[in-house]
Amino acid sequence: MAIYLSNADYIDPQTLEMRTTGIRVHEGSDAGIECIDANTANDPEIDCTGRIVTKSFVVGHHHIYSALARGMPSPKSSPTNFVEILEKIWWRLDKALDGEMIRASALAAGIDAAKAGTTFIIDHHASPNAASDSLHIIAEALDSIGLSHLLCYELSDRDGADRLASGLAESDRYLSNHQGLVGLHASFTVSDALLTRAMDMARSHNTGVHIHVAEAESDETDSLGKYAKRVVHRLSEFGALDLPQTILAHCIHLDESERALIKDAQAWVAQQSESNQNNAVGCLDASGFPDRVFLGTDGMHGDCLAAVRATYLASQGVDSLSPNDAYRRLRRVHGYLEQNKFTGDSANNLVIMNYQSPTPITPSNWAAHMMYALNRSHIETVISDGRVIVRDGVCTLVDEQAIFSNAKHQAQRLWDRL
């Protein structure tokens, strides 16, 4: 099967070369596109006259399980620091989740992401009292929307041996049949024994670890106190930085020795500017390793256009990204997926945007248009693995109304438990 996009103003996502052309989009997780002038095969056709067509987006670090938290009641006492934010909000929420809430979260978050032009999500999941089958539930939900994914379960010592055993079992079972990563919370809740087991599991499944690193200064303080070394040095000694699939999320409170390790490592860094601002933990300075950073949303939403604009603006007081620098950071995740042979992000993942600009669009200023003007409202159609999954702003493969009706019900159940 194939789709033909006629009269498309196509922007190459890497070179930013622009051309008006017809595009034949082949279906499949490893298929591609052809720029051809006529629909000689009589494929189903989408008229893209006046529309911009380019590659869709990837969320490099998400927390899908937080989808039902939007608008939830505040904790009885307000957190005063980052660890208290975890203890009073997120660790209470993740322990309250059950399978139906996990499914509802994944469907709601997946729809949000798809309608924002995202076709691939790298997710970091936690549900200590409902670990069994959790990754499988999320995968099934995202598959039903038409989204590709790279999932992991957040392993941690913070909830006791029994819950850790459930998380380890789910991770191992899932990775036996799916592409994914080995999830870890953060150094300050991960013992040496757990870190050893996680690295063994990652190597046995030919993958990497996905872990929060130095999101707050407290992570570094804990590591120095317990192990007499900083977080990145600790991860390096266990071999986590040697795995090209490894994702280090946040990396805000690093010293120069840690920056040097990351610069020379195989691991990648995921940046989440909006979440970092929300938690008042600072802003990533990636000046020591700019080519190893891509963008996530950290559960705030699934909107990569919003994330890149936030990153561009937040960086002005730190590592001073240009629009082109920010654009490259948005697109670098495609290289991570390609390098590690993860499927689901081939050239046949596209967005069709109705963006009527009052100024010229050129290869040299496209990034500026993205930073200052483009947003999710411009996205009309989304193509994932060669299939239309969003048309005229509506998901085509699932019943949005039914999903959101159930999500409200599951959200109330969750809030009642809290």
Image (tube, helix red, strand yellow):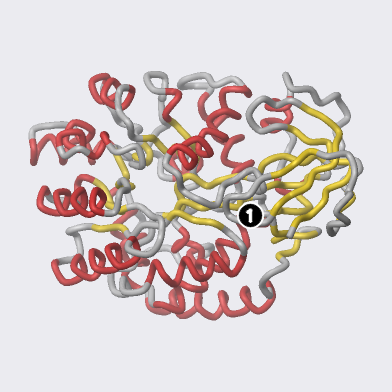
Q: Count every numbered label the image shows and give the total.
A: 1
Disc 1: CA contacts within 10 A as few (<14), some (14-19) or many (>=20): many
Amino acid type for the residue under numbered disc 1: Asp
Residue 102 screen position, x and y as percent: 44, 71
Residue 237 sits in quarter = top left
Q: Is residue 314 above or below residue 53?
A: above
**Left or right placement of residue 327 versus residue 253 in this view:** right
Q: Is residue 29 above or below residue 333?
A: below
At numbered mark 1, what does the secondary structure look like: helix, strand or loop? Answer: loop
Quadrant where the C terminus is found in the figure: bottom left
Q: Is residue 289 above or below residue 74?
A: above
- Residue marked by disc 1: 385
Quadrant where the N terminus is found in the figure: bottom right
Residue 23 screen position, x and y as percent: 80, 43
Which of 383/87 is in front?
383
At horizontal 13% and vertical 50% (from top left) the residue drawn is 191
Can the viewer see residue 309?
Answer: yes
Can the viewer see residue 76?
Answer: no
Residue 96 sits in quarter = bottom left
**Left or right placement of residue 196 versus residue 358 in this view:** left
Residue 54 sits in quarter = top right
